[in-house]
Every structure is written in C-alpha cells, then in structure tokens.
Amino acid sequence: MLGLLLRFLPFWVREPLFIVIGSVFGVRIMYLAVHDHDWKAAGIGTVFLVFTAIRVHTVVQALRARRIASPPPAQAPAPASAPAPAPAPVPAPAPAPTQLQAQAPVLAPAVAGPSPSPAAPEKDHNAWGQALAAFGVFGALAAAVWLGPHTLPSDDNTTHPASCSDSEHEKLPKAYARTPGAVTGDQLCKALNRPDLARLLGTPGETATTASVTNGTAALTDGKVAEPETEIAFDTYTVNLSATYNHLSIAQYVRLFDIAGDRVEKDVKTLKVLGRPAFFSSDHTMKIEINFGEEHKSAPVQQGPLARTLSIAPDQKDRGGSYDITVWSKSGALPPDAALVDIAEKVLPTVIERSAH
C-alpha cells in the first residue's frame, strides 16, 4: 500500500519523502548498531544512508535542470516610429450626386482596436512549497516514531529484572555508625544485582524476579554488630550476600567446625579468594508452611533444601568479620563451587570499594 502511494505522489513530494525516511531510519539504525556493536545493523543503516544520498543527488540534478530550462521573462516590443505624412492629393471636382447616392448611408471607417493579447501561461506548481510541506509532515511522523516508545505507555508484558529498593534514606541502626567502612544492604544489592549474575550461576536465560534488602544486626549481639544483607531470587536459584562486622576471623570459624566435628558433615573446604582466606560450608535452610484455610493451622518448622555458603575475609590479614555468599534452590540442586567463586570475584571488589568510602 505504501509503495503504491509513493508511486503516484508528485516528484517534489515523493523525493523529499524518500530523503526524510532514509535519513531518519539510517541515522537511527546506525546509532543502535554502534551502541550494541551489531555489524549487521550497521550494514542495514549504511544501505539506508546510501539510498538517501542517491535521492538527494536526484533532487539536486532536477533543480539544476529546472533552472536551466526556465525561459527568461518576455520583454514588450518597442513602438515603431510613425512614417512622415504624405502630401494630400488635390481632390478632383466631384460629380453631382445622384438620388441613389444621396440616400446611401455613410459608413464610418473601422477603428482598429488593440490586438488580443496571448493567453497568460498557466502558473506552475510551487515545487519548493511541496517539498517543505513534505519535510514538515513526515518529519513530524518520524519524530513520533522516534519518541513514541519513550513517551507513550507501553503494553509490553515481558518480565523486567527486579531492581534494588532505595533504602539509602532509611534510618540505620547505631551499629553502622560505630563500624567504620560498614556497607548497607542497598549497596550490597547494587553490587550483587549484576546483569551477568544468572550467567555466573549457570542459568543465563533467567531474569531476577525479586530483590530484597535488609539493614539489620547480627543475632545475640544486642544490636551492636552490623549485618546488612541482600537477596536476589531467580526461577532456579536464590543468592544471598551478607556482611558481618564481628571480630571472629575465618581461621577461627574453621577451627570451630573442627572442634564440633562438623567439618565433614558440612563439607567444609578452605581456599583463598582474591588473596583472602575463605572456606565453603553447607547447611540446610528452614522450611515454614502457613495454611490460611478454614482450620488456620501452620505446619511446624521443617528442614529445607541444602544451601552452599562461601565465606571470605574482608582483608588479607583476616582480622575479623566476613562476606558470605549463599546459594540454594527449592529443588535442592546447587551450582558448582566454582560458580560461587566467580560471583565473589565479580561482586566483592565493588563491595570493598564501597566500604573504603
């Protein structure tokens, strides 16, 4: 339908229309190609720009031909000089008029009137006016197409990644003011909620469904130990990142597992991450079921699926405290330990940088 319409448009409307469409779409596609590093889109944008350049050349050639073919304005011919009057001949004596001649009417000589002027040439259509009108109309359409997705409400029902809640203005417990370099749950969330977090977990096609933040304190410390945390949930896995600012070092944690005899049961493994002491451990989560039916009964707390935690010292000297990355799933499946190491190596530098400020 559009091709048929363009075919029947006048030249001075069709060509500016081609130029507007080609330039707008060409520049837009090239911008997206450079932004997304998409070479196929860059090729398509180049085709649009070359097409536009050809149409501009066509219009320029038409304007030049129109200027050459237009005739100069006609000038009125100069009036011819009147010839000198000839001497009047001496009239011969006229014969006496007869009766018929006396009754004949005397005809006056015809007076020569002005010669009819040639018909005025038909006024040519205003090519520049049509071109400017086409530019204005289709420029407005192009602007509407360009700005529409940003200004009009969208009916897109696709799932968007969960964003961290803005809790920067939330009143923090006093333990945060007493702890130099303590980060908040919001800062942990911004560091953990990365675009590549699902890929690091081994599920690149998933999108974060929820993101929660807590600015709490450690249990059994009377609110004196800051313990912020954040939690990012996917369809398969849930990731929790917390920071504990106590005086218990990683080495002391591992020694407690040895004393309690839980090292084998909890699959404790020591290692170094980012040059800092670290260890893996496993433990079961808690499962709580609440029934809102007629009986209003709640099931007792049960043992939930297994969770895997990587605990890392905040500094290389292991002077106390830890960053803990915990992963679990409803099905009980866990990603490999290497995935938690990759997450720590991507996320912790950002957390450490925030804590330095």
Image: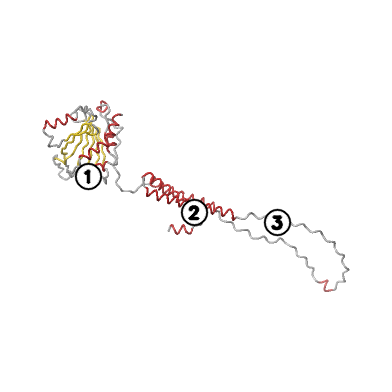
Report, in whole angstroms, how far the alpha carbon at label 3 lies from the one at label 1: 96 Å
Q: Which residue is mark 2?
A: 15
Q: Amino acid at mark 1?
A: Thr
Q: Residues within 10 Å of mark 1 (few under 14, many from 20)?
A: some
Q: Residue at x 19, y 34 (%)?
A: 271
Residue labelled with disc 1: 236
Residue 183: horizontal and vertical position, in percent?
A: 27, 31
The C terminus: image quadrant: top left
Tell me the crowding category of disc 2: few under 14, some 14 to 19, or many 20 or more residues within 10 angstroms, Cα based. many
Q: Position of residue 123 (x, y in %)?
A: 59, 56
Q: Is residue 273 above or below residue 10?
A: above
Mark positioned earlier in the residue sequence (2 or 1): 2
Left or right: 92 as drawn, with respect to 214: right
Of callouts 2 and 3, the N-terminal one: 2
**Which one is nearer the viewer's eye here, 303 or 65?**
65
SS under mark 3: loop
Tell me if residue 341 comes above or below residue 1 in the rendering. above
**Secondary structure under the numbered disc 1 in the rendered image:** loop
Q: Quadrant of residue 352?
A: top left
Q: CA distance from mark 2 to mark 3?
A: 41 Å
Tags 2 and 3 in contact by the CB under 8 Å rule? Answer: no
Residue under label 3, please give it: 77
Type of the residue with mark 3? Pro
Disc 2 residue type? Answer: Glu
| Residue 277 seen from this side | yes
Q: Nearer the viewer, residue 298 or 180?
A: 180
Image point 30% across, 48% down: which residue? 158
**Contact check, label 3 and label 1, Cβ < 8 Å:** no
